[in-house]
Image (cartoon, grey):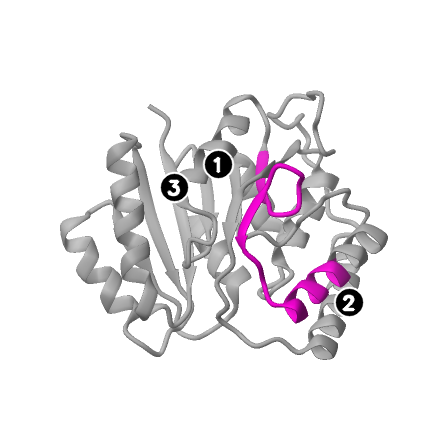
Amino acid sequence: MTKLSIIIPAYNEETRLGSTLTTIAAYLVSENVDAEVIVCDDGSKDGTVELVRRFAVDHPHFRVSEAPRNQGKGAAVRRGIHEATGDFLLFSDADLSAPIGEAKRLLYWLEEGYDVAIGSRAMPDASVTIEAKSKRKIIGRIFNFLVQRMIGLPLHDTQCGFKAFRRDVGKRLFDLQRLDGFSFDVEVLYLAAHQGFSVREVAVNWAHVEASRVNLINDSLKMFRDLLRIRSMHRHTPKPVKEPAGRQTAGQVY
């Protein structure tokens, strides 16, 4: 049976992580999934770590990976990818904005031979039941425009926190990946394109959970700087000697 690793980055998620873990545990049992769940704490100041430890007492395939200080979502996901032992690696936001049942949509394409499968809130078949606030949507559109113009990724949605990888591919990409913050998703997808890996964008159901404030100007400037860094950092990144595992299939993004 194929083993799945689920990686959940978490920072001060004590209030909602309990229900998330319970939901995931029930899903794994109902679908008879062989899985490990790694909650990658990012230096939380609340009871996030203790909550996961208590949950793991009765659910031994759940565990927490701790960081000594807050480093950013990218750093947390990278740590989880490196620690994961599954054949397929999936990272999901702690709020389960994409229900864990949507994992089947991504894993299907990995089983079909793709190297990477990413959830998308912007494809025609996607269902967004709760929209983000207008300011956040504006930032998302600005960022997607910059991604297409500056990075050249022909994607509808790079920032959906629901992505899956073949183990060897995920570990290769996150070995190369450097950004610790908001833009790490784009860096990983940029690397996938330049490493020759196949990527499938998949429409998913999504319910936005508002958890942080946004600053339209400051956040947009930071995104722009991050995209410049991605191009600069990986201009001379070596490509793999062997051909990637994924096959070339109609409908592939790149």
Asked if the stretch drawn in magenta spans residue 131, the answer is yes
> For the magenta stretch, what is the residue range?
116-143
Q: Position of residue 139 (x, y in %)?
A: 70, 66
Residue located at (66% from left, 50% from top): 158
Q: CA distance from mark 1 to mark 2?
A: 30 Å
Q: Quarter-wise, where is residue 6 in the image?
A: top left
Instruction: Identify the residue at image location x=25%, y=42%.
Output: 26
Contact flag, marks 1 and 2 (Cβ < 8 Å): no
Q: Which callout, 1 or 2, points to the residue nearer the camera?
A: 2
Q: How many marks?
A: 3
Question: In what element is the residue under mark 2?
Answer: helix
Q: Is residue 217 magenta?
A: no
Residue sitting nearer the eye, 16 or 76: 16
Give the residue type that dot 1 points to.
Arg
Q: Label 3, on which residue?
A: 5
**Sequence-first tag of 1 and 2:** 1
46 with respect to 223 (left or right)? left
Residue pushed farthest right? 149
Which circle marks residue 224 in the picture? 2
**Does residue 14 appear left or right of residue 105 in this picture?**
left
Q: Quadrant of the C terminus?
A: top right
Q: Residues within 10 Å of mark 2 (few under 14, many from 20)?
A: some
